[in-house]
Every structure is written in C-alpha cells, then in structure tokens.
Image (spheres, rainbow, N blue to C red):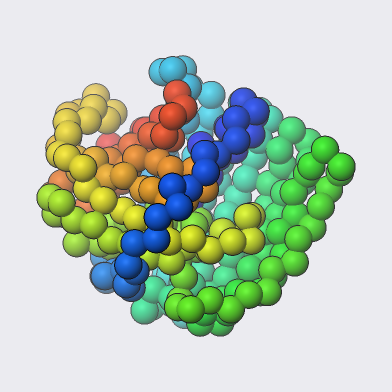
Amino acid sequence: MIRPGVLLLLILGLGPPDADGQSPATAALPLNLALLTPRSDSFAVLVKGIQLGWTRTSIENTASGQRLTEESSIAGLVGQKTIVDISGAGVMLRVRQQGTNQGQPTTVELDYLGPRVTGKATAGSPEGIKTVPVDTSLASNPIDDNAIQGLLPTLPWAPNATWSFLTFSGGQNEARVTTLRVLSTDTVEVSGRTVAAFRVEWSGGWQPAVFWITSEPPFRLVKIGITDTPVEVVLSTKP
C-alpha cells in the first residue's frame, strides 16, 4: 500500500525515482494467510519528525478470503481510502480506491482474474481529469501494489530473506518485478517502547521504501520510510 508516502510526494511536487532496470528471477511469495487475522492499526505520517497526517489499516475476513482496508489523510490536502480483496490462497481479486488530491478526484477500480487485470484509473493532471483503461494479461499472478503492506506479516521473515515477485500498479497501469530484502536487524522506538525489527528494503517499484517489521513472530509492521524523502510512517498503537 504505502500510499501515504506517494500521496505526500505529490503534495511536495516530488516524482518517484525510476526503477533500476534490473529484472531478478521471480517466484510466488510464500504467503501464510493463516497469519492474516482480523486487526486494525493506526500510523502517524511524519515529515522531519512533524506529524502531517495519519493512516489507518484494517484486516477482516470475507466469504472469499480477506479484505485489506487503508484510509489516509495528509495535511488536509490529500485523502484516500483503498480496499483490496484477496482470496484465501493470497490471489488478488479486486481493488477499489477513492480519494482526492488537492481537490481533484482519484480512483482505481481493478478486477483480477488470475493473471488478467481489467478496470480503470482516474487522476488529475495539468490537462484536467484523466481516466486510463486497464486491460492486461501478465505472465503470472501479480501482487497489487496496494496489498504489499497488508501482506508483510504473512511472510517467513528471517535474516537475509529475499523475495522477488511481480507487482501491478493500477495507478501506473504497469507491472514490474519488485524485491523485498532484509538488510539488517534494527532497534526501533514505537509508542514509547523499543522493539527489535528487521529493516526490509522494497525496491524496483514506483516509490522505493523501507519497512521495519518486528523480528519475532507474530510479525508486525511498525514503521515505513519513503526512500530519498523525509517521510516516515510510524505505528502509533502499541506493538
């Protein structure tokens, strides 16, 4: 998901860096969906340590699998709600996203049928509101970029763990190979507590980021850093 950082970059007028052009070998992510239990978390969106917004995430069970929901508000200028439905096997089913960016509406509506993705994405531009149709078939089942954050706790984290996988972005109407890689084990302060967390680099995507995930199960995302920006997203409920 990591939408708060991307949205704030739009406010600041910063574009996402280009991908590095490398294409590592891909495989299905080793997701353990039994770990995706109902819960909700709140995060503070910080710029140079000053809170400019918030984001709330939740997980709930559905008849077909699980639903990941994220709501964000940043600086009173950007707001967004994203719903991602996935099957019990971790296959993407649908994405519905609605929001505003400085008064202009943004939407993403995607339906996944295995490796085929159809729908549309709408966003503001200097020329006005633009809607881009999405209809593409990929070589393998992708992970939607809005689902990554919610699925992190379902992976078997360990020192030096690395996974490369196909990721699709409806907003960009593009698929890329992205990589999650554990760089180190750090100490992170969250809600007045110090926790040990894996420092995980996410690279190859539209806005690279670093995730901090507790190093002991049950795994939990406690912090996000948006690469090459002063933006941090920090858990504000107790880990």
The vertical placement of 234 against 146, above or below, is: above
Q: Is residue 185 visible?
A: yes
Give the position of the C terminus as an image quadrant: top left
> What is the x, y in percent for residue 188?
22, 30
Query: Seen in the image, is 10 located left or right of residue 18?
Result: right
Camera-nearest residue between 221 and 16: 16
Q: Quadrant of residue 222?
A: top left
Query: Seen in the image, is 206 located left or right of residue 148?
Result: right
Q: Residue furthest front?
A: 21
> What is the x, y in percent for residue 85?
51, 69
Query: Seen in the image, is 213 located left or right of residue 97?
Result: left
> What is the x, y in percent for residue 169?
56, 59
Camera-nearest residue between 216 and 129: 129
> What is the x, y in percent for residue 225?
38, 34
Q: Residue at x 15, y 51 (%)?
A: 160
The vertical placement of 48 against 185, above or below, is: above
Q: Residue at x 43, y 47 (%)?
A: 20
Q: Residue at x 27, y 30 (%)?
A: 190
Say how many tags the image has: 0
Q: Residue at x 63, y 68 (%)?
A: 110
Query: Seen in the image, is 149 located left or right of residue 8?
Result: left
Q: Is residue 67 visible?
A: no
